[in-house]
Image (cartoon, rainbow, N blue to C red):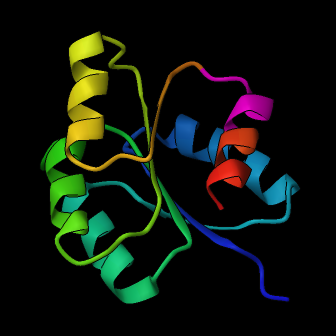
Amino acid sequence: MAKRHILVVDDEPRIVRFVRMNLELEGFRVSEANAGREAIEKVRDDLPDLVLLDVMLPDMDGFEVLKEIRSFSTVPVIMLTAKSQVEDKVRGFQVGADDYVTKPVLPAELIARVKALL
């Protein structure tokens, strides 16, 4: 059986390494994007099974990225971000997020949320 593919979208290398390591330890295949436009292309071209999406990206915010993704895909998306205001969470769900997790997050919780959506 093929490994489930997770796309991690974050411009902080430290966060990407942390998330990648924990997902790979659980047997997932992980790819990454460091900007919004790159993420949209990878969702379109690589067809990941799930996307972990930061809100604060260098070229466009994660909410706009998610709106674009939702125009062509129903891939599960977990917003993984430091933006913890209720308004941000509500906006995330309004534009199509399947879950919204604030940083810092414990690896066990993140893995549980990923597995629940898959």
| Residue 58 in view here | no
User: Can you say whether 1 is above or below 5 in the image?
Assistant: below
Viewer-closest of 5 and 20: 5
Q: Residue at x 73, y 53 (%)?
A: 115
For the N terminus, which image quadrant?
A: bottom right
Q: Whole-percent x and y of residue 37? A: 19, 65
Q: Residue at x 31, y 75 (%)?
A: 73
Q: Residue at x 21, y 39 (%)?
A: 94
For the C terminus, which image quadrant?
A: bottom right
Magenta extent: 105-110
Q: Whole-percent x and y of residue 95? A: 20, 46
| Residue 10 in view here | yes
Question: How many numbered marks are there?
Answer: 0
User: Can you say whether 41 is above or below 52 in the image?
Assistant: below
Viewer-closest of 50 and 56: 50
Quadrant of residue 5 within the rendered picture:
bottom right
Q: Whole-percent x and y of residue 81? A: 41, 29
Is-magenta flag for residue 51? no
Viewer-closest of 48 and 116: 116
Q: Residue at x 23, y 65 (%)?
A: 70
| Helix, strand or loop: magenta stretch | helix
Q: Whole-percent x and y of residue 87? A: 21, 16
User: Can you say whether 90 is above or below 97 in the image?
Assistant: above
Quadrant of residue 107 within the rendered picture:
top right
Q: Is residue 37 left or right of residue 104?
A: left
Q: Is residue 115 left or right of residue 99?
A: right
